[in-house]
Image: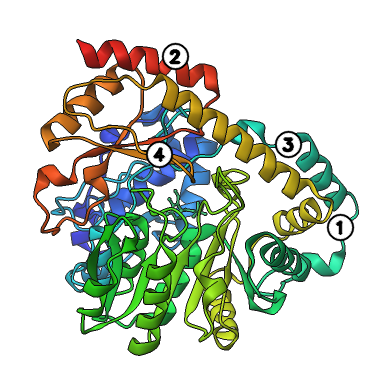
Amino acid sequence: MTNASLSLSFNPAGIQLDPRQGLSRQLYQALRARVLDGRLASGTRLPASRDLAAALAISRNSVVRAYDQLYAEGFIEGRVGDGTYVAQLPQASLPVRKSSKKAPTQWLDLPVVVPDKVIHSGALRRVENNHLPTPPSGPPRAFRVGVPAFDLFPFEVWAKLNAAFWRKPDLQQLCYGAPEGDARLRGMIAAYLRSSRGMQCSAEQIVITSGAQQGISLCAQLLVEPGDGVAIENPGYRAAGHAFAVAGARLHGVAVDSEGIDCQALAGLGDCRLAYVTPSHQYPTGVVMSLARRLELLAWAERANGWIVEDDYDGEYRYSGAPLAPLAALDRQGRVLYVGTFGKVAFPALRLGYLVLPPALVDAFSQRRAVDVRHSEVSTQAVMAEFMAAGHFQRHIRRMRRAALSRRNTLLTGWPRDIAGVGSLPSVAAGLHLTVAVDSLARERELIEKADRVDVEINGLSSYWLPDSQEPEDQRAGLVLGFAAVPEAAISAALGRLQAAWRE
Ligand SMILES: Cc1ncc(COP(=O)(O)O)c(C=O)c1O
């Protein structure tokens, strides 16, 4: 032992242990943190286990267990007949320096330092600038957006099918599976889309995803090179924009008029070969894309040698007549990638959706998906396939459509009239939400705050616009209300509270 190492001493006074938690684990963590941040320098002699136990008023066993773990991980070393020392660790390569200004992580009390080269990574910066807000907490309230009437989901049926799957699982299915998804489920989805949505697609064109968001993200990963222009509706579904921006796209917000995305403006974007659209029910304005506009959009894709990502998130909900045929049903050139989800018919947390792809893209998409997650969890896919095969899915869609219609009517009937600055209600022919204009951004904020004070959740239309939008701020104001999330009685009660709060 050198004189230098002898002079290093260890003072256990700063170590606070919570007697209600595992003591050896806490001691291990405290010592480890001190080695990593330099408070315990290499060569420092640690007290004998008996002495440390006495100093901390814990059992010697707890100290021995903590030392054993530190020893096994190379943080300390023992010298026979001598004692226990902090190991010689190259100071420059310790992950954490004392001088770090970053906040400590909770569990280890370690400051997090990201080396300069990582901070400057384009990918990290893109995620920092393009991420989803934390979802609202608590059970759904009126008028949460994006949530169907999932209180009506037949959980008993689902539970039975799930139990049946696990009672006698097919062992082959429990190994790694096909990245494109369960073959039976793909067949069921294709049959459903052919019979209910007028799409001429085969099971081979379907790739199962973890919800619509992953479908959109896969399109971004595979069809966008960093620097490419991507057109998105403005206002629009910001989470889709984020997926493209994270892949390195430069987003172009394109206006939406009463027929859908403005195809002339789209054609004017020279550098753009991909457009993301919600034709069945534009999110969030609710505009249904006209046939003329659909044809124009398809012609643009052909001319630009480009792609259309069609997000049909709530296409099942149409309140007069049958659901509209998707854009993909009109596509003769293999330009449309159709994004579907079970989240708006079952419930969002199911995380089950699908893509319907031009045949030439299927292999690349499933290979890309395999690199990410290999494939979706097996029982959810198998149970959904059985749920569809046994007719529950179609029955459930009908039930959900009736419920959403009735909840929509409750909102339309009880909506507070003549509120200053609030435009008239639109007619709502489809979807699960509606949008009302408001005459200024300040008024939008005020109405939302007042609603929140009486426990009513409303989104501001202004939050659906891209930050660099050219439209005057006040023209971006409005209220977006989901009407399906809670039953009629809760909607009526919320409307009563709104009426009083807004008239104050
Ligand atoms: C336009 C749009 N697309 C996709 C989604 C998300 O679907 P999923 O939950 O399947 O990812 C939503 C959710 O609200 C949406 O509004």
Residue 263 image position (x, y, % from top left): 29, 72
Q: Which residue is mark 4?
A: 427
Q: CA distance from mark 4 to mark 3?
A: 30 Å
Q: What kind of element bears circle 1?
A: loop
Nearest the camera: 327 or 156? Answer: 327
Q: Nearer the viewer, mark 4 or mark 2?
A: 4
Q: Residue at x 43, y 45 (%)?
A: 28
Residue type marked 3: Pro
Q: Residue at x 35, y 55 (%)?
A: 237
Q: Earlier in the sequence, mark 1 or mark 3?
A: 3
Q: CA distance from mark 2 to mark 3?
A: 26 Å
Residue type marked 2: Ala
Q: Is mark 4 within 8 Å of ligand 1?
A: no
Residue 24 visible somewhere in the drawing: yes
Q: Earlier in the sequence, mark 4 or mark 2?
A: 4
Give me the disc on residue 493.
2
Q: Which residue is mark 1?
A: 169
Residue type marked 4: Ser
Q: What kind of element bears circle 4?
A: loop
Binning the other alpha carbons within 10 Å of mark 4 as few (below 14), some (14 to 19) or many (20 upward) gives few
Q: Is residue 290 left or right of residue 254?
A: right
Q: Earlier in the sequence, mark 4 or mark 3?
A: 3
